[in-house]
């Protein structure tokens, strides 16, 4: 199995080699206003993610673009792995839509911005039964499991485990990664840690470096990419929301 994941290991390492340093993030996050933040970002490896933004780009446009970037990351990683692992990798793309999907599954109405979203527009119908039918067709594992009343994240995780290849049974590295994510509640508030994101990154990097050319390699890479996008999203939205305020108020 390690030989099958040699390419994934090489791609993951190359991608992670482009990650911004703590000092660079510190400089970015000390900027005031969206215009300055974007100016500094365009001098980093994150420039392609923000090249189409301006100082007046709306939060909805930023959110939609970053979700597209996440789907693109997952689609690329899907091509790195053996066929039997592709469904499990592809399933991670839906993580970006879980809050909206949970909203739909609980009977929530489609919001105006959802009709323009690449992934969510298929579910943005006015009739709740139509929405449920579309979800069950596109995401059968998630929509069916949600009937148990569990949190949508728990339903997502159960279905993801079902998609693992047979040899994943007893895979300690994958089990460690899942346990780590659950502990930090990555889809929630980070478990209350002061600097949960940086701490989680360090722990994921240890797993990535300690279990070379294994299935966990790809999922570590995707988690690190998600954390990077999360940090970028936070920086962009904080400044986009307060775009009309005075610099002192936005700082």
Image (cartoon, grey):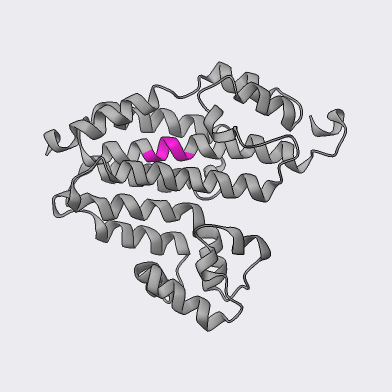
Whether residue 193 is visible, yes or no, is no
Q: Is residue 183 above or below residue 2?
A: below
Residue drawn at x 71%, y 23% is 31
| Position of residue 111 measured from the top left corner of the image (x, y, whole percent) | 66, 66
Q: Is residue 147 above or below residue 27?
A: below
Q: Quadrant of the C terminus?
A: top right
- Relative side of 176 to 72, left or right: left
**Number of disc labels:** 0
Residue drawn at x 38%, y 42% is 180
- Relative side of 49 to 7, left or right: right
| Position of residue 108 measured from the top left corner of the image (x, y, whole percent) | 61, 73
- Classified by dominant secondary structure, the portion drawn in magenta counts as helix
Residue 27 position by quadrant = top right
Extreme residue in the front direction: 52
Q: Is residue 70 magenta?
A: no
Q: Nearer the viewer, residue 61 or 98?
A: 61
**Magenta part of the protein: which range?**
222-226
Residue drawn at x 14%, y 38% is 4
Whether residue 95 is visible, yes or no, is yes
Q: Quadrant of the N terminus?
A: top left
């Amino acid at each position: 199995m390690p030989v099958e994941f040699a390419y994934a290991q090489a791609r993951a390492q190359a991608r992670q080699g482009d990650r911004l340093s703590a000092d660079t993030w510190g400089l970015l996050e000390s900027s005031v206003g969206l215009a300055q933040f974007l100016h500094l970002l365009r001098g980093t490896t994150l420039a392609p993610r923000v090249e189409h933004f301006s100082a007046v780009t709306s939060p909805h446009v930023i959110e939609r673009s970053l979700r597209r970037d996440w789907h693109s990351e997952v689609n690329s990683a899907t091509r790195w792995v053996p066929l039997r692992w592709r469904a499990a990798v592809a399933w991670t793309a839906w993580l970006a839509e879980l809050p909206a999907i949970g909203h739909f599954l609980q009977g929530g109405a489609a919001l105006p911005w959802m009709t323009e979203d690449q992934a969510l527009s298929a579910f943005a119908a006015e009739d709740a039964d139509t929405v449920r039918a579309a979800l069950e067709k596109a995401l059968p594992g998630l929509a069916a499991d949600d009937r148990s009343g569990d949190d949508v994240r728990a339903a997502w995780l159960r279905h993801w485990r079902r998609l693992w290849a047979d040899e994943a049974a007893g895979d300690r590295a994958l089990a460690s990664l899942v346990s780590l994510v659950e502990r930090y509640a990555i889809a929630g508030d980070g478990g209350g840690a002061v600097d949960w994101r940086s701490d989680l990154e360090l722990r994921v990097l240890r797993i990535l470096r300690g279990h070379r050319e294994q299935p966990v390699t790809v999922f570590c890479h995707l988690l690190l990419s998600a954390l990077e996008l999360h940090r970028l999203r936070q920086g962009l939205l904080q400044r986009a929301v307060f775009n009309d305020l005075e610099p002192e108020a936005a700082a």
